[in-house]
Image: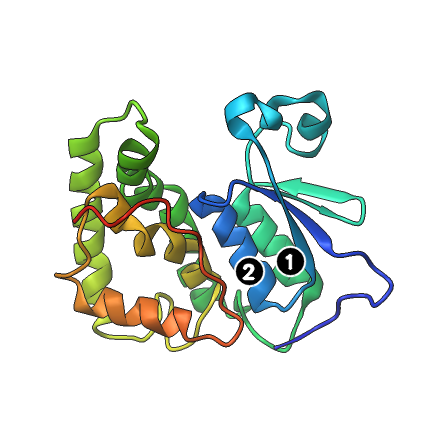
Amino acid sequence: MNIKFPTNSSPIKLYRNPISGHCHRAELMLALLDIPYETIDLDMANGAHKTPEYLKISPFGQVPAIDDNGVTLSDSNAIMIYLYKKYNEGYEWYPEEPIKAAEVQRWLSVAAGEIAYGPCAVRLVKVFAADLDYNKAKEITGGLFSVIEAILKTRNYLAGEAITLADVACYSYISHVPEGGVSLAPYHAIQAWLERVEAHPRFVAMARSALPKA
């Protein structure tokens, strides 16, 4: 997995909340591609993500966002695509073959859909006291995990036998779902998949925000 990061460039700036799964998604992609980066933790409780300066980088006031030597971009999935397209050489994080590409894209949609409304939402309620329907989010999580468990009994990674953007997009919130009061104990195939992702030599973990609640 070679990269083409210019030797005369400064490290990419990653604006983040260190316990945000969306931010970890972007940081994990940076790490897996072995791209030099520095993290800038925003004091979101005091509105650092809504300042005029930050809104020039992330117009919706969201994290993560990056500044790649003047090129600014927000949205975790968009950042992953950008990093892969610009810096990756020789490895298909997002395959060119139509069926394989569609499989990866499906999981990017799941990350923005079922994972956001399930594993992400239960954690938002428990960790951040978000005003969301916890029981509904837990129900979505259970249905999602049943599907993923069945899929991962037939393959090593979400989109096949090799790690792709699908795994990077989905890993963070699934691995931290115990912080939302959902146990991973019944899902042996999911646990094995998480371990495979974590075994990558350039893997970086996301900070734990609370002790497991289940």
In the figure, is residue 119 to the left or right of 49? left
Q: Which mark is residue 29?
A: 2
Nearer the camera: disc 2 or disc 1: 2
Horizontal and vertical percent position of residue 170: 38, 55
Question: Taking 82 as reference, is 151 above or below it?
Answer: below
- Tag 2: Cα neighbours inside 10 Å, few (<14), some, or many (≥20)? many
Circle 1 SS class = helix
Q: Residue at x 31, y 45 (%)?
A: 210
Residue 211 vertical position relative to residue 130 in the rendered view, above or below: below
Q: Give, as a three-letter code, the residue at label 2.
A: Met
Whether label 2 touches label 1, CB < 8 Å: yes
Label 2 secondary element? helix
| Residue 168: percent from left, percent from top | 45, 60
Tag on residue 145? none
The residue at 64%/58% (across/down) is 83
Of marks 2 and 1, which one's residue comes earlier in the chain? 2
Residue pointed to by mark 1: 83
The residue located at (81%, 66%) in the rendering is 6
Farthest residue toward the left? 186
Mark 1 residue type: Leu
Looking at the image, which is closer to me, 162 or 32?
A: 32
Nearer to us in this view, 190 or 181: 181
Which x, y percent locates residue 121?
Answer: 30, 36
Choose between 10 and 146: the one closer to the eye: 10
Query: Counting other residues with Cα less than 10 Å from the Cα at mark 1, is it few (<14), some (14-19), or many (20 or more)?
Result: some
Q: CA distance from mark 2 to mark 1?
A: 8 Å
> Please, which residue is most extreme toward the right here?
8
The residue furthest front is: 211
Q: Is residue 42 left or right of residue 20?
A: right
